[in-house]
Every structure is written in structure tokens, then in C-alpha cells.
Image: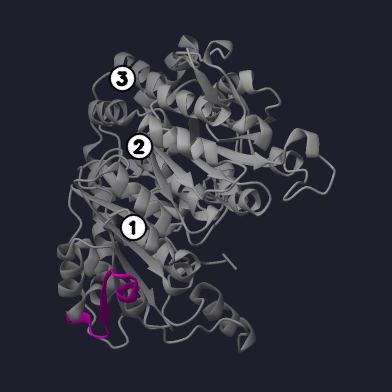
Amino acid sequence: MGKVTGGALVAQVLKNDGIEHLFGIVGGHVYPIFEGCAEKGIRVIDVRHEESAAHMAEGWALATGKPGVCIGTAGPGFTNMLTGIANSFLGSTPLLAIGGRASINEFDTGALQDFNQLDIVKPMTKFARTVYETERIPEYVGMALRHATSGRPGPTYIEIPMDRVWDEIDESSAQIPECHRIQARPAGNPEDIERAIELMDNAAKPIVLAGGGVWWSQAHDELKAFVEKTDLPLYTRSAARGSVPDDHPLVMGLGSTFDPSLVAALAESDLLIVLGTRFNFLFDAKHLPASLKLIRVDIEQSALCNGRAPEIGILGDVGVVLGQFTDGIKKNSHKEWIEQLRAGREQLLQLAGTMLASDQVPIHPLRLFGEIAQLVDHDTVVCVDGGDMSVWGSLALPALGPGQFISHASSIFGCLGVGIPYAIAAKLANPDKKVILTTGDGSFGLTMMEYDTALRHNIPFVTVIGNDKCWGMIDRPVKSQRGRSYACQLGHTRYDKIVEAMGGHGEYVEKPDEIGPAIQRALDSGLPACVNVMTDPEIGPALGDFM
């Protein structure tokens, strides 16, 4: 056996784990890791900002169900990743972030980019360590991947001092585990399963709400089998969108209390079955009637009473528990209840029909989404970013397959600018599918230089910007409450021209009948593309007391 660098050891563990991409920016503190990954066949996607690297790692996980890996050099490279790490932490997304660090013999001497990174990142990770011995690099990288993907998933962090990552050691002196995590999936307590089945059998108007736990368990087949056997209406949210496609007859829509049809359904329901998701501002427990009974399933015991305690709480992997439910429950029918919910959904669509067909100029946002929706099929991945644009997109665009609806609302961090990184990761994960990103002009500006990344790496996708020339989600409520707003206005910026100048495809749209043809030309271009659509700044989704 020959000599290997610490960086090559990192790459070997990633390769053994099935990692396909490394997202980051090179730096002297971490260069051997890039070198090792390239030599091992792990594709390096060198980005323009480390925050985007972290968001791409998130996007990869949201598109594949597998952990994403990002990297930043010491100091500012590390701090630039923090927003993405925090977003991943609050969204329970499995991610490994790797940071550089000054050489051990230079700690606290004023070395370049040396400061205490570990204490900063610990509160926003499941596991964070500095590796002090080159021989132990494989062990710690394996630990980090294991923690990122076990139980409730989330981000982990490993930093390796510069002298250790460049150090060359005998390959035989480092133990590289062939297996560092076991895919164990805990089942629910059989007594709890029986009680839950009895409650479901006796419910007249039950509802299923499925969240991110279904996606991380990769339990889409189990979810579909369960709702079909029991004839239960299904609402999906966060990373579970598309787990059962929205065009399935039992899928009733978005699992958010921003959706008025769900709020109306909850008012009449007698049982809510909550699968792998938690109450928060996107699904507020205050909308639940006191008489509504709850069954909750989660991989983490502390989450079972989050927001509101259930009648039955089941600790276990969502996929396994769904299998237990399906095996034990009787085939059922809720035909009248399903028809009632469908009628309510249709009534809502009819109310939106005028807006979906609006010919007004500036363009009504719902007309924009109506045009986009016509281009979404089962071979389309939809990414959603922005404030108002995220709400409109979540309500109006279909999720037609597992991992094919990737939204900034997958995390309660409310992080804008994730859309372009998510779209790049989604296209890497789905090279044969079209990827359409919808975002606002404010969010687009945060990470638009990643078009350079997409062009250099030949990663085509289409961004559709709803350009209202302002930070609309803040501007309208503030003006309504206070009569005027400050620092909310943005310019009439030709983002399409910026993308064209980089080498991509650009389209500018001011009239409603131009939207569909412009998006189709962008898709047909085979390039990273931008469709810049001017929308009415005075129209936004009704968000109640969001402000």
C-alpha cells in the first residue's frame, strides 16, 4: 500500500457511502479533499458562494432522499455555509458540511482564517467534531454521515486542520470502514398499532396529513398502499409533496393551513392521522377543533406531543408503521366524505378560475402559475422559492412524483435564495426530467450568480421569475397597516439579460398570452434559462395574520 493524503481518506469514505457530488469552493485548507473526490469519481460542483453549496447539498437530499455533502475552506468559507446548515437543521435535511481549519500548531497564533468555528456550528448540527489525527479521518467522516441520516435526519459538521488534510500517511494505518451505518427501521408498538386501527375503523371523516418523515423514510409506496386500502383522503406537505402524486383521486391538496380547503375539511373531520410532520406556522395547531382526535407517528418521541398531544402517539419509522397499519386494517370506503372534500376543492378552483384566466397587465400572479401548471407533467421537477411566489406556487402547482416538488417551505427557517441551488441539484439528480423553478425577483437576486455554475457544468433548468419589483410579502402588508413602506422597492431589472450575458437563455414577458410560449422556448433551449415575467405588485396571497 502507498501513501494517501487526509483529503483522499475523506474522499474514500464518501465514495464508499455512495456520495456522487461534492458542492463547494476550493481553498488551501481543503484542496486535497477536492483532489481526492475528483480522483475517486465524485463529481465536484464548484459554486460561486458557499451558501449555495450548502443549499445544493440540501436540494440533492430533497430530490433523492440521500445525504448531500458541501465543503468550505476555513474562516469565511465556513461562515458562508452557516445559513444553509441552519436551514437544513430546521428542515431536518441530512447534510454533511466539511470545513477547513488552520493547522493545529498554528491555533491561536493569528494564522490565516483561524478562529473557533466549532462552537458556532454546534447548536445547528446533530454532530460536530474537529479531527486531530489523520488516521481517524475515515472514522469521523463515517460518524458524521451516520448521525446525519439516523433518527430525525439533519446536518452534521466535520472540520479537519490544514496540516492533517495535507498530511500523507501509509494507507494501511487508516481503517476505512466498508459499512458505517445500518439501515435499521424501528416498528411501532403493536398495542399502539391496534388502538390506532380501531380509531381509524370507527372514524366517519378521517384525514391523513403526510410530511417530511414519509420522504426520509422513502415510504411513498407504503403511503399509497395505506390510503388506497382505507380510502382515506390525503394532504401532503414539505418533502412529502408528490409522495402520492397530486393527480391521484385520494390526494386533496396541500397540507398547510394556508390552504382554505384543508381548514374547512378540518372543521368537520373527526380524526387526523399525522405522519412524520410537526405543527408550525405552516400548519398551525390552533386550526384544529378541540373535538378532533389525533393519531401521530414520528421517529422522534419528543415530537409526538409537539403543538398538541394525540390520543395515540406511535414512535417508529413512518414506512414501517404504515405497513403495520395496512396489514392490520380492514378495507374501507369513505365515498361520501371523499366526494364532499372534492366538491370543496372544486369550488375553490372555480373561485380562482377568473384569476387563473386573467388578461390583466401587469400580469396577475395566479395567471402566471396557471400557465406554468400546464407545462408540469410526471417528468417535471418543480422547485419553489420566494415569499409570495412560494405561497402561490405551493397552492397552484402540482406535485406529480416523489422528490419532484422541492420547496423553500421544507424548512421553517424561511430562507430565500434557495431556489437556484435547489434547481441545480434537482437537475443533477434527475438528468432526464425537466426542472422548473418559480421564484420572486428578490429571491432570485440572492443566488443568481449560480447561473455561472450551471453553465460551466452544463446543468439546464428554467427559472420563472414573478417580478413585482419589490419585496412583495413585506411591502403590501406594511403599506396596508402603516400607509407606506420603506426599503421594500426593487428596480425594473432585466434578469433575463443578465442570464443571457452569462451565456444562458433569457425571455422577457409583459403580457399573459406570452407566458406559455416563452417558458416552452426556454425549456427547448437546452440551456440554463430565465423567464422574467412582470407581475402586479398590488396582488398577493391572503396570509391572514402572518405579519
Is residue 131 visible from the viewing direction of this image? yes
Q: Residue 490, percent across and down?
A: 50, 83
Q: In the rendered structure, does residue 500 fall within the stretch colored magenta?
A: yes
Residue 422's place in the image compared with 445, above or below, is: above
Q: Earlier in the sequence, mark 1 or mark 3?
A: 3
Q: In the rendered structure, does residue 254 fall within the stretch colored magenta?
A: no
Dots 1 and 3: beta carbons under 8 Å?
no
Dots 1 and 2: beta carbons under 8 Å?
no
Q: Residue at x 56, y 75 (%)?
A: 474
- Closest to the observer: 232 or 365? 365
Quadrant where the C terminus sits is bottom right
Q: Which amino acid does the dot numbered 2 rest on?
A: Thr
Q: Which residue is mark 2?
A: 64
Q: Residue at x 18, y 80 (%)?
A: 514
Q: Which residues are magenta?
A: 499-513
Mark 1 or 3: in front is 1
- Closest to the observer: 203 or 460? 460
Q: Which residue is mark 3?
A: 326
Whole-number angstrom distance, CA of label 1 to CA of label 3: 48 Å
Whole-number angstrom distance, CA of label 2 to CA of label 3: 25 Å
* 10 Å crowding of disc 2: few (<14), some (14-19), many (20+): some
